[in-house]
Structure formats: structure tokens, C-alpha cells
Amino acid sequence: QIRHTTAELQAMDAAHYLHPFTDHKDLGARGARIIERAQGVYLWDSEGNQILDGMAGLWCVNIGYGRTELAEVAYKQMLELPYYNSFFQCANPPAVQLAKAIAEIAPAHMNHVFFTGSGSESNDTVLRMVRRYWDLKGKPGKKTIISRINGYHGSTVAGASLGGMSVMHEQGDLPIPGIVHIPQPYWYGEGGDMDPEEFGLWAARQLEAKIEELGEDKVAAFIAEPIQGAGGVIIPPSTYWPEIKRILAKYDILLVVDEVICGFGRTGEWFGSQYFDLKPDLMPIAKGMTSGYLPMGGVIVGDRVANTLIEHGGEFFHGYTYSGHPVAAAVGLENLRILREEKIVDYVKQEAAPYLQSKIASLAEHRLVGEVRGVGLLGAIELVKNKATRERFAEKGSTGTLCRDLCVRNGLVMRAVGDTLIMSPPLVIKPEEIDELVAKAWRCLDLAAEQLGV
Ligand code: PLP
């Protein structure tokens, strides 16, 4: 491989590379940050800077960087069978084994997996599968999917439509028909005078109001992340999920829990559904499924839907060239072996999460911070001008961006969602690395406060 200097790479990047979710005018002025290598929880850029990855890439490198076992199984599998499709009644050993291994860690009533190549494809699959289910049940009118404002379910047309990001809807005339959105359970930002429990009930009852408005014979499913990740690590108040469960049971509507972020240990349980005691019909997954080492996604399908699809017979005309890709599946299996044998999910629950949460709680004392919240190894820091009134700084998002940029310059990746800083480090982060993360976050808040003159 030819080695290029940072400046050469940046020039080639600017000339040829269109990035996802990027303002290229801004990128052109700054030059892309080139990440060259990684180990454990650390990244190194092309200038030699060591950066603690407080986001596990994009919420995905659960077992940390540099696990050679994954490279070895990928190499072996490429030599043995680099590719074969799983259409037309074919299968390959790693994909079959991975389906079984996932069924073993999933809630007891979920025993089948439909493989995809990404979280977005998983949610496209969800949209088609729930409609197929209701068709087979003789209720073809049940087509509409209810989702939430500010939820994130991917970037494909169906994924972005299911998601509730207005900036995405504005580009490309979304959502597509048959998808409607209700408010999110974001107490700190939208709870007004209500206490969190009261607000949780209010937000959940927006679902009931929407079902009543549309008619239950029109509603196929409700989709939500257990904790909204890209929306700003929004943790629903304790009253929210129990009320949602009551409503879905009352109207016989399928529950889709998007586990793309929470799945594979992030909350200290295998799935966010287990953390919140949910009984989903479908769970889209990706990211932590391979710890991001290779692209792969899937939908874990509960018995109710799977048995209907199977027993009815007939083809579900859906699938991807890379569904059940043997190399990705081999990597997924090895990732799962590591998570299980090294008891990483127990480590999150018993050690890393309590430690991280107690440490980040101290950031609430900083003069720029209005609230700190978190579950498992997810965390959010709300930046405000006035702690008492929750007033924000004038230009929306500018304080978040300022802090994020100061963080990365000082060796820490955190992401900014508007004026909320969010974190999601690898699950294997050690206590001393958590200390480093929190110390760096505090320092960046200080630097930002100085620049803002507060
Ligand atoms: N669902 C959730 C909850 C996500 O956070 C994401 C990505 O961040 C997706 C779906 C889309 O996954 P992908 O980017 O693999 O298509």
C-alpha cells in the first residue's frame, strides 16, 4: 500500500470523496481527520495524536479495537468460502451458527434471525415484514407504522422515514406514506412543568391518541429505540415503557424495538428490551453484532411473526445479496464468543456502567452543564447557559460543536447532538480509561466556558 502524507490524503479526499452526514464546504476548509489505526479504546490519527474513542466508532466497537481473533476468523473464512448467497434455500455454516447463537441470547420468545447488511436495511426489512405479517393474518389494512419524532432508524428511504429527524425528512420529501410520528419522551428538553413520571405517561399516551385517530385496524406496528441514541441519548422516564406496553396490548399492535445501538451489551443487558422488560415482536440489530469489524445487520423475529411467515408458506420477496454473508457471520460469531466468554456484558452491568455513571454525574457540577444522564455505557451531557431555567446559548448547536471540537483536539471523541454531548465508549473500557474520559470532558467544558466568557 502506498503511504501518503496527511496533506496528500486530505487533498485527495477533498477532490474525490463525498462523505455521509458531512458539510463539504466546512470539511474543505478544515481537511478531513484521517484515522490510521486503533487499539483497545484508543485511536491514532495520521498526525500521531492518540484519541480516546468515547463513541466506540459509531456506537459499534463493543469489544474494542485490535482483537486479532476477528481478523483470523475472517481470513480463514475468506479462504474457505468468501461468499455465497442465502437466497433460494441455501445457507452457509457461519450464518446458521450465528442465527442459533443470537437466538440463545435473545428474549426466550425470539428464535429466528433475518440477516441484512446494516441497521438501515434491517429497518427496511421491518417495514416490509410487519406488512407481510398482517396481510397473512387477513388484515391488509393494518399498514401504518407509528414512530417517534427525533428517533433514528437509518438512512435508506424507509429508515429515514421511520426515523423522526426533520432535517432528513426535508431532503427527499420524506416520510413515505404510511409512517407517522408521535412526540419523544425527552423530559429534560420538552417536559415543561411536568415531573418525569407524569411526562412519561403523557408521552406514551400520545401513542394511544394516534391509534385512536388512525383507527386500530390501520396500525401495523410501533417502532422505537429503547433509548434514543442519535437523538441525544434520550432515556424515557420510568412510566413510559410500561404504558406503551399496555397500549400495544390493548390494540393488538406489533412492537418493534430498534436494538441497533442498545443490542449486544450496551445497557448492561444483552438487549435494551431486557433492560426495560419489553417483549418485542421484532428487533432490528447491527453495529455491536460484529463490533463494527465487518458490516452486518439483522432482524431478530419473535415466534408470533416468524411462525406465521413459516406456517403460511409462500415466499417473502425480500433479501439482500449480502444477507448472511459468510465472512461477516464468522466475525459475528467470534465477536459473540468473546462477549460471552469474557463476560463483557456482566462487566458492563456490574463494574463499568456503575463506575462511568458515578463519574459522569460529577460533570453536572460544571457551570455549563444542565443535566447529566445515562444508562449502561451510554451518557449525555446537556449544555446550558442557565442551569436553573435550562436556557440554551443563542445559536442552537454552536456550544455542542465547540465542546466536541475542543474534545477531539484534546484527545477525546464525544459527539454533539445540538447542544447535548453524548458518549458511548467501547464496553471493555477500563476504570482508569473512564477517569481519563471524564477528566478530558471536564477540561473541554472549562475551555469552552472560557471561550464563551461564562
Ligand atoms: N437504528 C439505530 C437505532 C441506529 O442508531 C442506526 C445507526 O446509527 C441505524 C438504525 C442505522 O444503522 P446503519 O447506519 O448500520 O444503517
Image: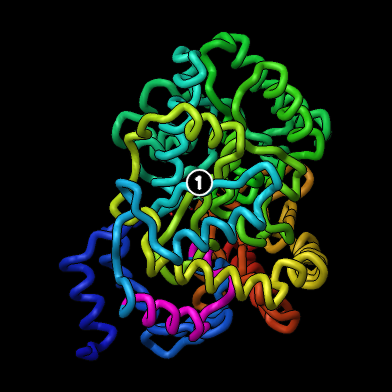
Q: How many numbered marks does the figure carry? A: 1
The structure residue drawn at horizontal position 61% and vertical position 63%, both measured from the top left corner, is: 424
Dot 1 falls on a residue whose secondary structure is strand
Q: Ligand 1 within 8 A of label 1's CB?
A: no
Answer with the quarter of the image where residue 239 lies.
top right
| Magenta span main SS | helix
The magenta stretch spans residue 59:
yes
Asked whether residue 6 appears in the rendered view, the answer is yes
Most foreground residue, 321 or 180 = 321
The structure residue drawn at horizontal position 39% and vertical position 46%, both measured from the top left corner, is: 121
The magenta stretch spans residue 77:
yes
Segment colored magenta: 58-78
Using residue 364 as the reference point, say whether residue 405 is left or right of it. left
Quadrant position of the C terminus in the picture: bottom right
The structure residue drawn at horizontal position 65% and vertical position 67%, both measured from the top left corner, is: 445
Q: Amino acid at mark 1?
A: Val
